[in-house]
Amino acid sequence: MALNLKNYKKIRTPFVFLDETGSINSLTDRFFGLGMIKCMQPYYLDYKIRQLKQKHNFFDEIKWNTLSKSKITIIKLIIDAIFETPGIYFSSIIINKDNVNFKKEFDNNPYKAYQEFSEKLLIKSIGKTEILTVLADYITTPKSVKYEVSVKHMVNKQLNRLAIGGIHRVDSKGINLIQIVDLFQRN
């Protein structure tokens, strides 16, 4: 279906919050994963999480690897809030790095691999009438890597339409919805 102003009421514009787990170029991490949460109005879930964090004086980042017995109650409440929020969609891909020939497929370029895995996850998660706005966890890359531009253009090209309106990498420390992706994709 071609999206145009004639049928704009059918167009959905969800936000996507994207995070990775493991390191793509670490020899000790056998698995690498990318996960995402897609939702139409992230304000509602983010507001619930902020209220819970304030009520419980929890000002830490929501991260699986910092989970402790003292944080279990608040993390459970946050997870309950996620499941109580309608329209939240989670998707992920987990790559067993033992089964990938990084030299042959990606010229041993971890940034190229990360971009292509991001494209695969996004393509399998985009509905036919959706145009996504993607907020991805920031990772340090060489100046020559144009992740936002490359992924957006490749996904739009592969789907032959405007499927991603924009991508921006942000520091996950201030973005609750990127942080909760970490809870759901832990390998």
Image (cartoon, grey):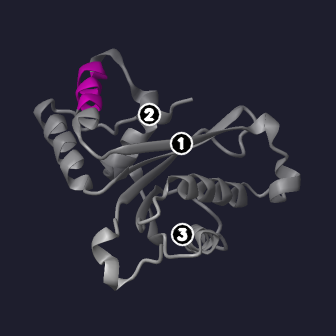
41 magenta-colored: no
Which residue is under mark 3? 148
**Nearest the camera: 169 or 10?**
10
Identify which residue is drawn at 29% across, 47% down. Answer: 87
Identify whether 9 is placed above or below 97: below
Residue kind at label 1, given as amino acid type: Ser
Q: Is 185 or 143 nearer to us in this picture?
A: 185
The quadrant in which residue 110 appears is bottom right
Q: Residue furthest left?
A: 55
Q: Is residue 43 left or right of residue 72?
A: left
Q: Does the residue at mark 3 contact the one at mark 2 (Cβ under 8 Å)?
A: no
| For marks 3 and 1 on the same chain, the one whose residue lies earlier in the sequence | 1
Q: Quadrant of the C terminus?
A: top right
Residue at mark 1: 92
User: Which amino acid, by three-letter code, is at mark 3?
Assistant: Glu
Q: Is 5 above or below relative to 61?
A: below
User: Which percent across, then down, holds residue 112?
Assistant: 71, 61
Q: Residue furthest right?
A: 104
Dominant secondary structure (helix, strand or loop) of the stretch shown in magenta: helix
Q: Label 2, secondary structure: give it.
A: helix
Q: Which residue has dot 2 on it? A: 184
Dot 2 or dot 1, earlier in sequence = 1
Q: Secondary structure at mark 1?
A: strand
> Amino acid type of disc 2?
Phe
Distance Cα–Cα, label 2 vs label 1: 9 Å
> Is mark 2 in CB contact (under 8 Å) with mark 1?
yes
Q: Which residues are magenta?
A: 71-80
Query: Residue 105: x, y in percent?
Result: 83, 55
Q: Is residue 69 left or right of residue 148?
A: left
Q: Residue at x 55, y 71 (%)?
A: 152
Q: Is residue 28 above or below residue 174?
A: above
- Label 1 Cα crowd, 10 Å radius (few <14 / some 14-19 / many 20+): many
